[in-house]
């Protein structure tokens, strides 16, 4: 029984996750770009909008833009890394690897979870490296002084939230990649979807100033991953956000829905 479960689920998922990591670290430009863009955004936008941004925390103090934008920059890493890791589905299909996996007796759930866990773990690793390196940027003068430094419990909680969010975003990318035949087409669709989805999550600016904008943010599943991350970090700007249990529940339901749809799509016969 145990050996059967190991061969059917644990081993295939582990191998697919390892394959995603090997492919990622062999592409040095992808490694640099995944970390450099959020750091540059956080430093430049934080310096440029420092004087124009005014926000009070829940305890009455002031919140700087870089402090507010820190979870949003980490979420950018999770969003782009997890979704663009789904490009490997298209590449594996073109190279014939995917057809071999589909022809094997491996359950479809193992295929979907292996792909999604690989993308989510890559996103988690990069996002945590960024969050842990933020105090170093303050030390060298690239970021203003702000409450920084995370305890062990906070770090574990952030890992859980980031992994859950990454699973949902990787699942969303998997659904698109399964239907799109070319990498260029995938990039075209994602370029239209990703930036609005990130901006309308409350990552870059608070949505409380507009009623319709607040409504759009409330139906964006990425907003709840950001809300959970803000709660865990404990910025003090959580007075207008969904509660932590609600944020975790919505993020979990979204990730589970993407996994279920992914399994259903892989079981359907295709024209190819």
Image (cartoon, grey):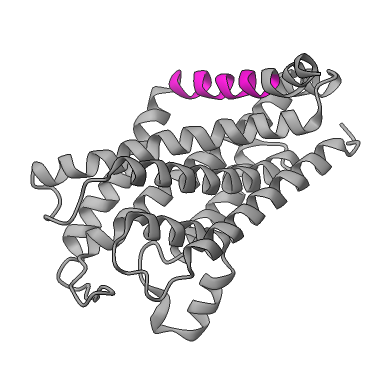
Residue 94, by quadrant, is: top right
Residue 144 falls left or right of residue 84: left
Determine if the magenta segment contains residue 14: yes
User: What residue appears at the point 68 percent right and 22 percent down from the top-left corner?
Assistant: 10
Residue 81 lies, in percent from the top left, at 48, 39
Tell me which secondary structure the magenta stretch mostly adopts: helix
Residue 156, by quadrant, is: top left
User: What residue appears at the point 22 percent right and 72 percent down from the top-left corner?
Assistant: 53
Residue 63 falls left or right of residue 35: left
User: Which image quadrant: the C terminus?
Assistant: top right
User: Does residue 158 lie above or below 253 as drawn?
Assistant: above
Q: Is residue 51 visible?
A: yes
Q: Nearer the viewer, residue 230 or 212?
A: 230
Residue 228 lies, in percent from the top left, at 45, 58
Q: Nearer the viewer, residue 179 or 239?
A: 239
Residue 136 lies, in percent from the top left, at 16, 39
The residue range painted magenta reads 12-26
User: What residue appears at the point 27 percent right and 45 percent down from the top-left corner?
Assistant: 150
Determine if the magenta segment contains residue 199: no
């Amino acid at each position: 029984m145990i050996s059967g479960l190991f061969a059917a689920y644990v081993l295939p998922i582990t191998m697919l996750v390892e394959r995603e990591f090997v492919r990622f670290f062999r592409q040095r430009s992808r490694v640099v770009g995944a970390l450099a863009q959020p750091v540059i955004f956080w430093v430049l936008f934080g310096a440029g909008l420092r004087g124009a941004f005014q926000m009070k925390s829940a305890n009455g103090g002031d919140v700087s833009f870089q402090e507010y934008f820190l979870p949003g920059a980490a979420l950018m890493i999770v969003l782009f890394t997890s979704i663009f890791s789904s490009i490997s589905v298209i590449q594996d299909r073109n190279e014939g690897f995917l057809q071999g996996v589909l022809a094997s007796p491996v359950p479809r759930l193992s295929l979907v979870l292996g792909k999604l866990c690989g993308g989510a773990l890559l996103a988690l690793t990069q996002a945590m490296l960024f969050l842990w390196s933020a105090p170093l940027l303050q030390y060298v003068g690239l970021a203003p002084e702000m409450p920084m430094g995370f305890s062990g419990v906070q770090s574990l909680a952030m890992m859980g939230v980031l992994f859950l969010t990454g699973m949902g975003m990787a699942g969303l990318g998997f659904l698109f990649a399964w239907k799109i035949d070319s990498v260029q087409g995938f990039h075209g669709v994602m370029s239209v979807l990703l930036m609005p989805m990130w901006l309308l999550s409350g990552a870059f600016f608070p949505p409380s100033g507009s009623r319709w904008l607040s409504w759009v943010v409330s139906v964006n599943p990425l907003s709840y991953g950001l809300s959970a991350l803000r709660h865990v970090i404990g910025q003090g700007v959580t007075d207008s956000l969904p509660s932590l249990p609600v944020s975790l529940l919505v993020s979990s339901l979204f990730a589970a829905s993407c996994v279920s749809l992914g399994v259903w799509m892989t079981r359907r016969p295709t024209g190819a």
